[in-house]
Image (cartoon, grey):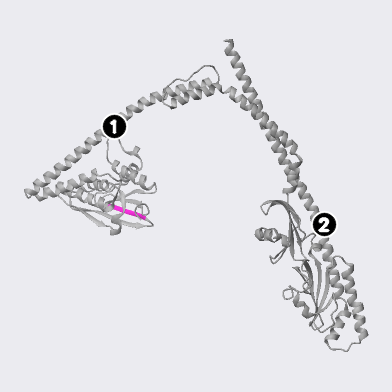
Amino acid sequence: MAEKKQKSKISLCKKIILIIVVVLILCTSMWTSIMFFNMSKNAKSVALANEKTNMLNVSSQYKDVEETCYLVQQIILQKKSVIEYIENVRNGKDLKAVDKIDFYDTEISSIDYMININPYIYSVRLFVNTDITEKHPSFYKMERLEKMSWAHSYKNNKWVFDYYDSLYSSNKKTTHLAGIVSNLRDDDGNLLAVLEVSTDLNDLFLNFCKEQKNDFCCFVSNDGHIYSSDDNKEIVTNNKQEILQLANTTNSESNIMKFNNESSVVSTMYCSSLEGVYVHASSTKEIVESYYKSQFLYIVVVVVSMICFIVIIVILINNSFARFNNLTSEVSKIKNGEFVRLTEKGNDEISELGKQINDMLSALEKLNIENTNKQLLAKNAEIRSLQNQINAHFMYNVLETIKMMAEIKGDFEISDAITSLGNMFRYSMQWTSGMVELKTEINNIRNYLDLMNLRQDYEIYLSLNIPEELMHIKIPKMSLQPIVENSVYHGIENMAEDTSIYIKAFVNDDIVNIEISDVGVGMSENQLKLIREKINTADAIEDGKEHGRALYNVQQRIRMYFGNEYGLSIYSKEGAFTKVSIQIPLDKENA
């Protein structure tokens, strides 16, 4: 007894240790996950703050450069001496050499001086629409304008972006430029010159064309054109729609979002005077990874601790589940066919599991006995079914013999009746499929009416209105004959006079409608209501009465084959008619 208590005590200790270890691992994992989540969040917050600072610098420099370009443009446009000189040359006025020298040394040199003293100005050029003497780098003939890529696309007093200095073939195409272009006109509106004030795109937008790892920037004009450095062309191509969507704003903002398939800080700055939006994106991957690397030692400690915990857990599980392994071995024997009882020593969960399995084995043994008895009953039923089939074949063969005897004696009316009866008998025996063609069911109804006409002093005629193509649709077997039989017994038999049963078929909205009508005694409103209830629920059919049961069975079989939206509908008027309509789909075995 003391040994059992000791074993129970040890087992409980192991369980407590296991629970403690698991709780520690879960808590450590949760705390580590929360810490890394916060690290990632903090890193992204730092990246967002840095991006906002960077955008302030970009905005400040953009405004400085823009104001400088506009200032230079206005100074030149207001130089009346330049306009007068160009008009004099155009009008062919004879200028003295000293006046020309003075103009170039004073006015043109002042333009050159503005270029030299202002680091933001790349060039200031006047392309004059007359035959003047050119002076590098700011005074040229209009013909040289054709060498500029924007010569035929610029608009007056508007900016042009991302072009090279192609005025001379010797110029290296390395600097991406942006410039404001304006026209100088005389009082009559005639073009005198085209003024270009340009700046380096790297000055207009800070580091626009400099390659920077994990950084992307571009400028999107209002007409949807995207300007970027050569290094960013591929990113523009892969993310064009996303960039255009980002540029669809008039605000300046910075947000963390997914861009170019990675988490990034994305900023937009609307530039009203440039008529476009500056877009900048900086990946957060590098700064997040740097935060993770700073915690590498902590991660190593956590991983080593986790490994130690796992080793401890494995040892504890192996010790705690030694009896469970024995239980598994005994269950394997049962699986292999050995009907054994499991050991139920002890009072812990494993012992309880053994008891439950033993109870299950007892229930299975009882179930096997019951199942064997059921199989015997099923086999006996199968034998009886085979005997009935043999008896049915015997009866059919006897009918064939009687038919031959009637034909030999020349009694063809009896022969025809036996033929109809035999056909009905054969039709009811052949159940290779639950579905038959409509024409097959119609033939069975003809045989049925032929036999009924032998019994009565009056004739029941079958009138058909069925298109030939609908004769081949599939319907549930024996679905029309019970309806016709109801028409005879409940609608026509009490009249005792010649009459007809009408069968009509047509298609409406991909639904086949088959209508069976008689001009018998009909039904009252209460009778019609009752029969409608009977065909939809078995509870409405009184025990021991077959009236309504046949229609109920037909209704259930149609719904079983085609769904609850199809089935029987009954219409009747007392003393006038009864009509049963069957609806089945055209597209299921019938299309």
| Occupied quadrant, residue 303 | top right
Above or below, 432 against 317 in this view is below
Q: Is residue 59 visible?
A: yes
Q: Which mark is residue 222?
A: none
Q: Which mark is residue 379?
A: 1
Identity of the residue drawn at 82% across and 74% down: 125
Farthest residue, direction front: 170
Residue 312 rendering spot, x and y as whole percentages: 65, 26
Q: Quadrant of the C terminus?
A: bottom left
Q: Are marks 2 and 1 in contact (CB under 8 Å)?
A: no
Please give the residue where the numbered disc 2 appears in the rendered image. Answer: 57
Please, what secondary structure does the residue beneath circle 1 have?
helix
Identity of the residue drawn at 85% across and 80% down: 83
Callout 2 amino acid: Asn
| Occupied quadrant, residue 240 | bottom right
| Occupied quadrant, residue 35 | top right
Is 523 or 589 nearer to us in this picture?
Answer: 589
Instruction: Report the magenta residues as a range.
Output: 511-516
In the image: residue 333, left or right of residue 191: left
Within-10-Å neighbours for mark 2: few <14, some 14–19, many 20+: some
Q: Quadrant of the N terminus?
A: top right
Is 158 or 321 nearer to us in this picture?
Answer: 321
The reply to whether the magenta stretch includes residue 513 is yes
Above or below, 340 against 296 in this view is above
